[in-house]
Image (cartoon, rainbow, N blue to C red):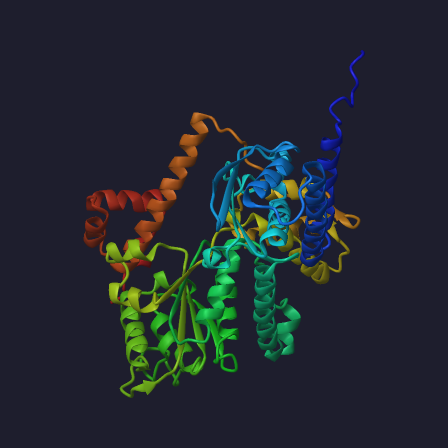
Amino acid sequence: MNKNPLAELTPVFFLQTFILELMHASEQQGQKHCEQLIEHIAKTAGCFFEETYRENTHKSGQLDSESYTELILGIKNNIGSKFSLVSSNPDCITVTNSRCPFGEQVANFPELCRMTSSVFGGIAARNFGYAKVEIKKSIARQDGQCDVCIYTNPHAAKGHAGMEYTDTTPVKEVNDINELQCRIETNMQRLWHKQSRQAAKKHQSPAIIAKSPVMQKILQSIEVIAPTVATVLIQGQTGVGKELIARAIHAMSERYHKPFIAINCGAIPESLIESALFGHEKGAFTGAIEVHQGYFERADGGTLFLDEIDSLSPAAQTRLLRVIQEGELERVGGKQTLAVDVRIISATNQNLESLVKQDLFRNDLYYRINVVRLNIPPLAERPEDLPYLVQLIIQRLNKRYNRGVESVSREVMRKIRAYHWPGNVRELENILERSILFASGKEMTELDLELPDKAKSVVEWKGVKEHALAKIEQSFLETALKQNHGNIKRVSEDMGITSRAVYAKLKKYQMNLADFRIPD
């Protein structure tokens, strides 16, 4: 056998592998360490590349746009990329790339894009006095290609996302985001320490991970809307951290010294929801033996977070609308009008616009709670946040279970990045908690997680599709039954099917009609 088993180990391949392993090691050390390492490598390398280019081309003085473009394309293409120029003008240079030198493995480390940004931006700033690098698309984020804009005019760059570079100092925007995140977390910690010692002992203090561009925009939105009195609607899948964002808004507002009360509307029985929210008078109904203050009264002066607001009954929606419009309420069974000053932050994992069109949610209430809307992206759309979330969760689990796990293995991180996390952060916490109990040593090498097969057969796909449609149908049926209090005729009209078909579906999903009817 004459073939050299290491024939493919070229200098470039060796360095690429080395960088990937360096990235894996650095992400275990925490967010700041990883950022500082990337910046240091990129700035130093960029200076070296520029000096090499000048020596070989005998150029001195500032590079013009043409030379700069030749340099940055040459840097990338000589190590295996496939960059080309899209457009160039005095304000902006745009380049595109169809091949990453790190191959498919780059999807495990989207942070490497920051290295490209700092090389491009650092060289541009030294020659043009200013640069902002906007990575519009990235192979690392599975966009299929990289589209990079390098703005050399601060006026042209205004309004575009990206990192700013002046002279040789990058990251004005990154510093701004880090400072903003620090302010938000400091305010949240301040509220946290006001809680009882028991609560602080039982739970970990809140923290928001925002390394992805989408989450950084959420932080910027929090700073803008928190000082106002505007109602906020937070939309996002289950487990993305909607309540955490609501707490951050409260912490950054002038109401921070007043109560923050969180209610899951979907967890309160429909017959009790009005009493829970608005209170009741003695004798208002059987069992009402004394006056009860509702959540609105208890949150007076502060913030009320209404999670799963889509599950409110029509009567509760009407009462809520009045409180928002008039700033006053009446307890159930009461005649006295009470003034309340409460900021409403609502949350849902449903499409409220769709529910409004189906007459399942009040149109006027929707517009009242939707003055400002924040859409929290699912974890699958925030790959940059994953290593930092993993590290934060592991630190918390170590404290809870008195373990000494410091990091996860590369294979474990690969699994985490490859999974789509339908349960989002909550599911990630659950999986890591289960796995850390069985971890031995300082590195977690096993993860209790089965990755789905990449390619499903037609039969499997049909099964997945049927299951998904059945879940949607069951959810819609349940909502229609709630809104119509079990009236089969109205439900059948809402669903566009016969009453007989409604009964068939009740049987199919083992749903009891009596659970939705109002008792006489």
Quadrant location of the C terminus in the rendered image: bottom left
Name the one closer to the observer, 473 or 446. 446
Q: Position of residue 315 (x, y in %)?
A: 27, 69
| Residue in front for this viewpoint, 82 or 280 | 82
Single out the residue that lies furthest toward the top. Answer: 1
Residue 449 in view? no
Answer with left or right where residue 450 lies relative to residue 509: right
- Name the spot of residue 311 as percent of width and height, x first: 35, 61
* Residue 259 sits above or below residue 422 on the image: below
Q: Quadrant of residue 112?
A: top right
Residue at 36% from the left image edge and 46% from the top image edge? 472
Residue 344 shows up from this direction: yes
* Quarter of image, res 210: bottom right
User: In the displayed structure, would residue 250 be above or below residue 156?
Assistant: below
Q: Quadrant of the N terminus?
A: top right
Residue 307 coordinates in the image, percent (x, y): 43, 64
Q: In front: 497, or 507? A: 497
Toward the viewer: 37 or 203? 37
- Residue 331 x %, y %: 32, 81
State left or right for residue 174 relative to residue 290: right
